[in-house]
Image (cartoon, helix red, strand yellow):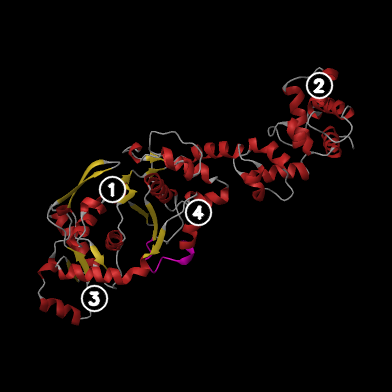
Amino acid sequence: MKVRFAPSPTGLLHVGNARVALANWLFARRRGAKFVLRLDDTDMGRSTPEFAKAIEEDLHWLGLDWDETFTQSSRLERYAAAMQRLITAKRLYPCFESEEELIAKRERRKREGRAPVYDREALRMTAAQIEKARENGKQPYWRFQLSPRSITWHDAVLGAKHVKLQAISDPVLVRADGTFLYTFASVVDDLETAVTHIIRGEDHVTNTGVQLDIWEALGGDARKLSFAHLPLLTDSDGGPLSKRLGSLSLRQMRRDGIEPAALAGMLATLGSSADPVAAMPADLVETFDISRFGTSAARFDVSRLLVLNRRMLHALPFEAVRTRLPEGATEAFWLAVRGNLDLPAEARDWWEVVTGTIESPDLPQPDRDLLATALAILPEGEPGPDTWFTWTGALAEQTGAKGRKLFMPLRLALTGADKGPDLKTFLPLLPRATIAQRLAAAIGTPA
């Protein structure tokens, strides 16, 4: 068994691509199959080594590896050989119409109430007409003559599917400049590298019908191929999930501080009946079942991802985030603040509260009076794990304040914010001199 993930290195990896990659990887690891990374870089004008490298880096970040990898640009001779076989079999034929001529044909067929498919006029050209066109400087592009039949298969996600080939234009497989299109190159690769299962998006259903016809024309046995088409993702409002939204690229999510386990856990279950659990792909293998995916579009809700990310972040040990924290940040600091973070980058703001300066709050006189008492009875020595309870207990006894009236003035004076980490664990991060200075500033008295 063998599956493949075949991104084009013409841009950054998007969450929709990542979902397909993850589904292929989990399927392969669950079934003991090989997972192949194929870079579809036949679009020489848009494919770049930088994007190829970024794709590999992002897949590794997500926790995926591969058993084999290759680029389509390294197999051009194989595509040329397959092209010649189809020409010899009279399944690939040259065409010379311009784009303007094709548009005019489609519009005419629409006006006549006919389907706007290619009329196969080029098939009726004689050898002399083809030669004359070439002599006039025209370079042909090549279409594949589809069979007059319907292609059927059982899809592991969508169930029984069929594609009526008579309703589709003969696809262009080779451009006039000699470059090969995805529809063709992908079939040659899948056939020659012995791919057995193809897992991809629902937008490829029609492609599957066409490619199975090409597969058989090249001598392949369609019975040896299995398909699973995942319904496409939508945004939180049910609209198309645009690939141009940079915020939904894996690269941007990495920069924003999304944990790979949170994203993997969400993508592995999105569109299925299973509840997402933050976990790296290796820990999701045993529970992955592609048949659990539904046939309806799945919504990618960023707010749900952030909830999952928050849960994951709050449980991370210090060593897992040490390199992403501000220089000098300690384990005690991380354990104190992690429960208040959505993203690791937010830790920098709390580190500034610990090591920098804050803006003193403008408090009413009763709160200032309470803080004055708090300053007067501030325990000697640097604060420890019991300081908060000892200090606030004495403060409550002397002032009669309790609950929010006791704690909120202290929080505002010590952190400059009305919410944040539990002060019993945050207080020991502050030197006694800093505590005294901030209390004095809040009541308007020099420390």
Point out residue 67 in the picture as x, y percentages from the top left corner. 42, 56
Q: Is residue 162 magenta?
A: no
Point out residue 140 in the picture as x, y percentages from the top left corner. 22, 73
Q: Residue 60 got which mark?
A: 4
Q: Residue 329 got which mark?
A: none
Q: Neighbour class for label 4 at 10 Å: few (<14), some, many (≥20)?
A: few
Point out residue 298 in the picture as x, y percentages from the top left corner. 38, 39
Label 3 sits on residue: 139
Q: Nearer the viewer, mark 2 or mark 1?
A: 1
Nearer-N-terminus badge (3/4): 4
Measured in 3D between alpha carbons, the distance from the residue under mark 4 to the one under mark 2, in whole angstroms, is 51 Å
Residue 397: in sight, yes or no? yes
- Say which element carries label 1: strand
* Residue 241 falls left or right of residue 329: left
Measured in 3D between alpha carbons, the distance from the residue under mark 3 to the one under mark 4, in whole angstroms, is 43 Å
Nearer-N-terminus badge (4/1): 4
Label 1 sits on residue: 227
Q: Nearer the viewer, residue 186 or 248?
A: 186
**Image: magenta residue range:** 39-51
Amino acid on which the number 4 mark rests in the picture: His
Q: Nearer the viewer, residue 374 or 347?
A: 347
Measured in 3D between alpha carbons, the distance from the residue under mark 3 to the one under mark 1, in whole angstroms, is 36 Å
